[in-house]
Amino acid sequence: MDAIKEIILSDDFVDEVKKTIKPHWGELGWVTYKRTYARWIPELKRTENWSETVKRVIEGNINLDPRLKKADLTDDQYAGLVREAQDLYKLVYGLAATPSGRNLWISGTPYQHRNGDALNNCWFVAIRPQKYGDSHIVPNYLQKDQLAVSMPFSFMFDQLMKGGGVGFSVVPDNMKLMPVVDNQVDLTVLIGKESASYDDSIAAGAIDRDDWLAKNDLSDTRHYELPDTREGWVVGNANMIDAHFNDTNDGFKDVVLDITDIRAKGEKIKGFGGTASGPVPLIEMFFDINEVLNEAVGRKLTSVDCTDMGNLIGKTVVAGNVRRSAELALGGSTDDDFITMKQDQKKLYHHRWASNNSVAVDSEFKKYAPIADSITHNGEPGIVNLELSRNYGRAIDGYQAGIDDGVEGTNPCGEISLSNGEPCNLFEVFPLIATEQGWSLEEAFALAARYTKRVTFSSYDWEVSRRVIQKNRRIGVSMSGIQDWILTTFGNRVVTGFEPTTDPETGDTVQKPIYDQRVVKKFDDLYQAVVKADKEYSDALGCQASIKHTTVKPSGTVAKLAGVSEGMHFHYAGYLIQRIRFQDSDPLLPALKACGYKIEPDVYTKHTMCVEFPVKAANADDPNFASAGSVSIAEQFATQAFLQTYWSDNAVSCTITFQPNEAKEIAPLMYQYRHVTKSTSLLPYSGADFKQAPKEPIDKKIYQERESEVDENVAKVFAEQNDNHDKKDIELVDQSDCESGACPIR
């Protein structure tokens, strides 16, 4: 080609697709999309419609193909990419598949080009002194190759503020690398009277800047004026952390942070979207983290100290009222202080709620009983088997020594085992919908593989991430609505029964699952299609094939778009009332009211309304249907093991629900699947035992009554009421991208 240009999907093409393909909206689909992923279009004074969102997302992804930047791109290559973009558009527009929620929000925006990191859902970082390297954030008192205790916390803070979840490791091997805390630091936070947040900041512990300067000399302190940027928050925190250690302290024991320029609460955040929290949560975080470090003077930081610091950062990000802060803390399996740290109720309610906590084990680990006991009381800790992740892809492919030897942890939802600084990179196919819409599943999954591969060519802000991404090119092609698809296609669930067998290592009798071999073959075929597509595309791009390819993510919000079961999970119930909370100013509320949905004030939060949606699960009336409230804990473990054996070479995100009478089975089942399951977590099945529960099981009769009362064409009513002009930056209160509700909105 004479000139390289970006790929743009034509309006004629989009119009033709809209005539021939109908999006497979779930009962909550359009409402969830409109308030979660539809971006504001300033010139049209409205948010996107679905066709515009998909166009933005696909164009943002296809133009990451590195060949488009090369002068030797051929006409055939360019035409092939155009066809691929068109195929992806049709696949996603019909809701036969979708990128991650993060991509739906960021792909194709200017923010993507400024911060390529934002295309990835979640990250992992090891808590130990690290180099900042050639990154977009390097505190000016450090050399790029200088080890600093602050670095992993800066990485975490940065990624959380960009909307990503972060897993972090505080296992004993990392804690041994922590230096002794040398210095007690006297922290002062200053604010000028010109700040709109002056009074609130003073109340939170800040000091009037002019008064302080009249009595003190800045030259005697480590002083930093925070600019009104994400980076400013990160560097301010780094200044305070590193002052506690002689290797990163230039001799000052007093740290002065000036937060005058931080924008006030409620002001708009450009780029990612949402509103600012103001400086108060930041002030509180500075003092809280400084207290943790001051209390550790003369000793090394512990796993509990570091988890507290991570949780305090997460708490601050949550206060921004834009997104949740998803964190997973990974500790040692024999670290009792870490395992029991949430039993301190005061600290739990103050900040320790900000992470889900898991412990790292290997296949030789046997002490599951105390872990199971803890799970029955508070649902934690989860289990992460790093040995399996380092030496196995799919279980069926057998032991492969060091195939993924850099793995140190996982993302917050556990579906991807990750190296230090590495992100998860996700796309999912809804196989039942794809089949109904006439797609070859092998083709759909091949498109998914190529989409995720292109994300690895984004511009990444942190050197540690760039290095590991270029090394691994890890992708995570997932599927959702798994239970719906298997039951519809094969007439039964994948686990058809159990048979007694002897554990060769212990001699104990265990119940071995029996899998439908038709399902086994289909999953294996689809896995091979993903691997083949990745190899062919990698060869075309001149890069290495991905170290691993497949996963099962939890898929909370995205699954609602298409109305399918979430990830590998069983539907919560055959029929249920799904409650979603909205800000009381949300322009969708009048449309929902006009359509007959029950709306009432939220009993827990001011200025929030609770809307009830009647929902029917696919196959709810099938005699082989099972819900989370009825399926046995044994079948859930077996289903996760099936997917880890025949589909996922990364991991399988699974939150297993159990009834009170099944608690005794937790430890034996964890041990039975010790050579297969890479990560898992458990929660007691709650039913609807509190007022305005997010999900309330109902019977078929009540569902039919409630369904007959509503008009589901909310999109049409909304457009008529607003003359296609809605409000900017209104957010859902309680949606998340994860089935557990732990991960970020986007």
Image (cartoon, helix red, strand yellow):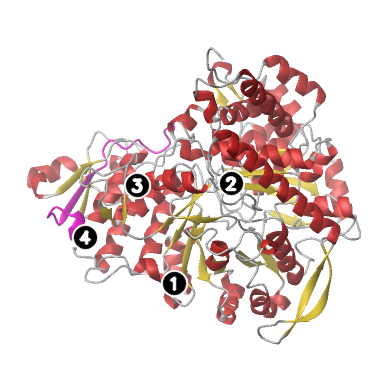
The residue stretch that appears in magenta:
245-270
Can residue 280 be seen here? The reply is yes
Query: Callout 2 environment at 10 Å: few (<14), some (14 to 19), or many (20+)?
Result: many
The number of numbered discs placed on residues in the rendered structure image is 4
User: Magenta segment: does it hold 247?
Assistant: yes
Marks 1 and 2: which is nearer the front?
2
Circles 2 and 4 in contact, beta carbons < 8 Å: no
C-alpha distance separating marks 2 and 4:
38 Å
Label 4, on which residue? 245
Query: Callout 4 environment at 10 Å: few (<14), some (14 to 19), or many (20+)?
Result: many
Q: Secondary structure at mark 3?
A: helix
Marks 1 and 4: which is nearer the front?
4
C-alpha distance separating marks 3 and 1:
29 Å
Q: In x, y percent, where is residue 504?
A: 70, 82
Please tell me whether residue 156 is drawn above or below residue 35 in the rendered image.
Answer: below
Please tell me whether residue 485 is drawn above or below residue 41 in the rendered image.
Answer: below
Q: Secondary structure at mark 2?
A: loop
Circles 1 and 4 in contact, beta carbons < 8 Å: no
Residue 712, by quadrant, is top right
Q: Secondary structure at mark 1?
A: helix
Label 2, on which residue? 475
Label 3, on which residue? 280
Circles 1 and 2 in contact, beta carbons < 8 Å: no
Q: In x, y percent, where is residue 219?
A: 9, 45
With 389 as the anchor, is 600 left or right in this view? right
C-alpha distance separating marks 4 and 3:
26 Å
- Which amino acid, mark 2? Ile
Of 610 and 43, nearer the camera is 43
Circles 3 and 1 in contact, beta carbons < 8 Å: no
Q: Which mark is residue 338?
A: 1
